Image: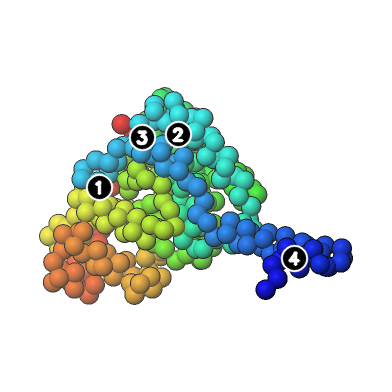
Amino acid sequence: MLSVTHLISRSTPLVVSSIIAKTAMATSILLASAAAYADFNHSSWDSLLNKNVTMTNSSKASVVNYAGMKADKSKLDSYMDATSKVSQSEFNAWSKDEQLAFLINVYNAGTVELVLTKYPNIKSIKDIGGVFGSPWKQNFISLLGKTRSLDDIEHNLIRGSKRYNEPRIHFAVNCASIGCPALLNDAFTASKLDKQLEQVTSSFLADTSRNRLKGNTLQVSPIFKWYKEDFATSWRGTNDLAGFLARYSPSLGLNNGQAAQLKNGKIKISYSSYNWNLNRK
């Protein structure tokens, strides 16, 4: 059998050129395909989280060492710069899990970046923007060809796109506040996304300082009030907020009977208060 080398050596220059061009094109397609479906490298963000985020209360909450984040600001800047270089076409070629992990990480890194613009002279993220401004509406994140706000990432790219139908993102995106679900001390990745989303959701719901059964009333975080419609989208068979919460009855400390009562409307749902103080260490 003749090798490719022998075939080329016995071919005319025109045929040789054609073989080389086709080989180069095939190689280019393979490389592009591999790049499109390879996880974006979140290792630098992961190392910042590992170093500066401490899980507390049996991993139901976390605190951030913003002084440490500020000392490592160059690493945070490099990560944000890398995420800003991802084009819309590259992003579109990724799996849904990789897209969602990417958006969650950018949102959380952007939140830390925003806090650092005022740290240490800040008690709450709501202090940023003043009386008439909103920290979540400030355009400062370069992402997918536009300069975006945190609101744009969460409400348009994640929630508004209708692409993901993932209510658990509310326990993954972090607003730098004590009342917010914990900032996980690991970066989200496509390969672990479902496991990580289950982890942060279950841990948050198990926190009795924010979610608890009192008599015949289940008091839950106002997150469930603000985004109630996101828990009524038939996600994994849960058609309303009560159904979603009943799915996590073990985390909420509910037995099977109480979970059934919750689904049947015999346990009322009310909303606790929200602590906007900075989740600083």
Give me the disc on residue 6.
4
According to the image, label 3 marks what residue?
51
Tell me the quarter of the picture where residue 186 sits: top left
Label 3 and label 2: CA atoms lie apart by 17 Å
- Decide which of 102, 22 is in the foreground and name it: 22
Q: Amino acid under label 3?
A: Lys
Q: Quadrant of the C terminus?
A: top left
User: Where is 109 relative to 71, above or below?
Assistant: below
> What secondary structure is marked by label 1?
loop
According to the image, label 2 marks what residue?
115
Label 1 and label 4: CA atoms lie apart by 66 Å
Q: Position of residue 140 (x, y in %)?
A: 57, 39
Label 3 crowd (10 A; few <14 / some 14-19 / many >=20): some
Residue name at image x 51 percent, y 66 percent: 163
Residue name at image x 16 percent, y 63 percent: 254
- Decide which of 186, 198 is in the foreground and name it: 186
